[in-house]
Amino acid sequence: MSPTNRQGWLALPSLAWLTVFFAAPTFIILGLSFKPATVTGGFGEGWSLAAWHMLWDPIYLAIAWRTLWLSSATTAICITLALPVAYYLARCAPRRRRLLLIAVILPSWTNFLVRVFAWKTLLHPQGLLKQLLDATSLIAPNQPLLYNPGAVLLVLVYTYLPFAILPLYAAADRFDFGLLDAARDLGANALTAFVRVFLPNVAHGIGVAVLMVFVPALGSYVIPELVGGVHAEMIGNKIAQRAFIDRNLPLAAALGSCLMLVVLLPMWARMAWTRKGTDPKGPSNPASEPNEPAGGAR
Amino acid sequence: MIKRFSWTATTTWLVLLFLHLPVAVLIAYSFNASRYGGRWLGFSFKWYERLFRDDEIWRALGYSVAIGLAATLLSLILGVSGALALHRARYRLRGLHFSLLYLPLAVPDILMGISLLLFFVLLQVPLGVLTIVAAHTSFCVSYVCMVVLGRLQTFDFTSIEAARDLGATPWQAARLVLLPRLVPAMVSGGLLAFTLSMDDFVITFFVSGPGSTTLPLRIYSMIKHGSPPLINALSTLLIVFTAAVIAVAQRFTKEVPRT
């Protein structure tokens, strides 16, 4: 029995649902950003550029810049830490590897808010980490650990590290480690072999990892809200503030549209990159994507 | 070679320590009599006792479970039918269908949250339990669909042909041959959908209304203005619960006969 057209109706329920509850809302926010805001917190009649004018405020530029650098730094640190882990996982014995993989995924099964809260307790002025650091006098006694961009970066790395490890491990697992020995035999030192042989061979995994860390990091809201405070806000905080505090929905829509643009760009870049490469089947082979850690940072 | 190996091993163990330490400390603190973590004032169950007396938490848990069950059921129906269509049928909108199922996995939560909020405001839909179920279903469908799709790829569709040759109607063949083989994927997809729904904060935060405080919303307000030790105790219970769910899910995936 070959694939048939008769089963096409099975596509209808999910197609209809996602068109209404995913595609329509996603496209609608761009349109809504050109609506005037009303005092009652809704959308007015006619069209207006007011929301986009308000985006030119230096406050929003600073926020956009902070969002970009925090997400980029998170991505860079996660990849740097995940590479040796992926390398080690791919090389160790199957039994130990399975246990280590479970250990990597396990924390992401803990409620996301709970994990952020755990860091908040650790970094609290009376928390364990702060007390330890005070005892070793590594930091100035008055230096707060919470409520600064550094705390946000730390918790972002903590949250997204498993998202970097898994795709890199999937790539390293397919790597032929005999090639490293060959490189060493041909006179390369360990570092050269790692950089010139191992890295290019896991480039695909690095691409997936970048996407899986950078994109959700851009949309962070809870982490900067709970450990960041006013001086470490990201674009997500501004979206929530415009939606809930002063109820300027068109401005929230404009901020959302900007975020969407920044999110779609790296995704398009990667799609163009894979299409150029060895994947002519395109979307027909979804299983080729490594799975993300389930229940991660939703 | 040996030197490099130990270097990567060290990094791995440090990374694992980094990933597990906060959760471990949290669990330990839930038994700490002291209100703040810095000092250990003795072993105590008092936060658990207080937790069990906190009615708001249990009501929030009730909402979360009800919403989770509804979203799981809906996303199973939509996700399984969607996966079957993607895997078996050839139709014009297949590419679009796949993108619609794939993109929710990639779009940040806050974008999904704000777009759904604006969408509901525009259509003047009152926010509450129903809007939360709709939102949760929308992101759970993709996960269910991907899990089932993965299972379908190892399913040998000639067994359906065999059933048809032996006189089964298409419906009988689907019910008696295909469905039993899909049950493990449906169970793990369903459990995944349920935990994702129970866990979701950001999207729920945007589309919830008065009288629909789910457990994560309650935890969030406790973190923002409340009692840290209670959250430690609650978190420990949640971790135990999630571990149990994973154990069940593992059992179901293990029972799958290799094809």
Image (spheres, coloured by chain):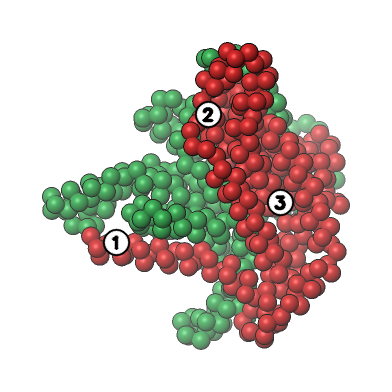
Chain colours: A green, B red
Q: Which circle, 1 or 2, is nearer the viewer?
A: 2
Q: Is residue A296 visible?
A: yes
Q: Which mark is residue B155?
A: 2
Residue A40: quarter of image: top right
Check disc 3 and report its element: helix, strand or loop. Answer: helix
Above or below residue B236? Residue B105 is: above
Residue drawn 78% across and 31% down? A46
Circles 1 and 2 in contact, beta carbons < 8 Å: no
Circles 2 and 3 in contact, beta carbons < 8 Å: no
Check disc 2 and report its element: helix, strand or loop. Answer: loop
Q: Given the image, what chain letter belongs to the residue carrying mark 2?
A: B
Rendered location of residue A192, percent (x, y): 22, 54
Q: Which circle, 2 or 3, is nearer the viewer?
A: 2
Q: Amino acid at mark 1?
A: Phe
Rendered location of residue A33, percent (x, y): 69, 38
Work out whether residue A1 or residue A285 is closer to the camera in this orientation and state it: A1
- Residue at mark 1 shares a chain with residue at mark 2: yes
Tell whether B159 sits left or right of B168: left
Of labels 2 and 3, earlier in sequence is 2
Above or below residue A286? Residue A210 is: below
Check disc 1 and report its element: helix, strand or loop. Answer: helix
Q: Which mark is residue B5?
A: 1
Tell whether B114 sits left or right of A296: right
Residue B74: quarter of image: top right
Rounded to the nearest angstrom, the CA distance separating label 1 from label 2 is 40 Å
Residue drawn 52% across and 20% down? B158
Q: Amino acid at mark 2?
A: Phe
Say which residue label 3 marks.
B198
Of labels 3 and 1, earlier in sequence is 1
